[in-house]
Image (cartoon, helix red, strand yellow):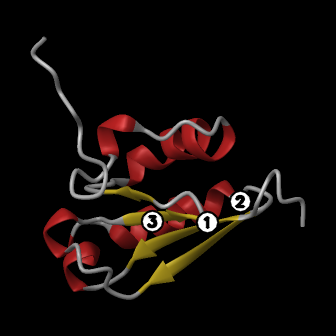
Amino acid sequence: MDISNPYRCVLVCQYHSCVRKRAAQVLEAFQLAALPEVFVSASNCMGQCSSGSTVYVTPDRTWYSRVQPEDVAEIVMQHLQLNQPVERLLHPRFHPRLDSDD
């Protein structure tokens, strides 16, 4: 394993509240992307039920909230291929934005 390019794991919550918000389709979209060195897996509840569908990318420690199947291509391209998280989908609990009025 090349540590300069570690394998990533994308976990997609498949608990009740996320499934009601199309998490099964989100998981399927990630699986269809089939990127090398990216393992995609269903996850049990991640404790973010009000923010589903929830996606967690490790080892990046990046949390995404309210992900829809239409968002997956953007996450794959921008985050998984270009190493730039998708700002608009970042979970505010884990990635607070520091907006400045200055």
Residue at image point 19% right, 78% down: 17
Query: Among all residues in the image, which is located at the extreme left?
Result: 101
Q: Residue 8 falls in which quadrant of the image?
A: bottom right
Dot 3 lies on which element? strand
Q: Earlier in the sequence, mark 3 or mark 1?
A: 1
Question: In this figure, which residue is indicated by the disc labeled 2?
Answer: 34
What number is the disc on residue 97?
none
Looking at the picture, which amino acid does disc 1 mark?
Answer: Gln
Work out whether 67 lies above or below 83. Answer: below
Q: Earlier in the sequence, mark 3 or mark 2?
A: 2
Q: Are marks 1 and 2 in contact (CB under 8 Å)?
A: yes
Q: Position of residue 2 (x, y in %)?
A: 89, 59
Question: In this figure, which residue is indicated by the disc labeled 3?
Answer: 56
Q: Is residue 58 left or right of residue 46?
A: right
Mark 3 and mark 2: span between their CA atoms? 17 Å
Mark 1 and mark 2: span between their CA atoms? 6 Å
Select label 3 or label 1 by which is in front. Answer: 3
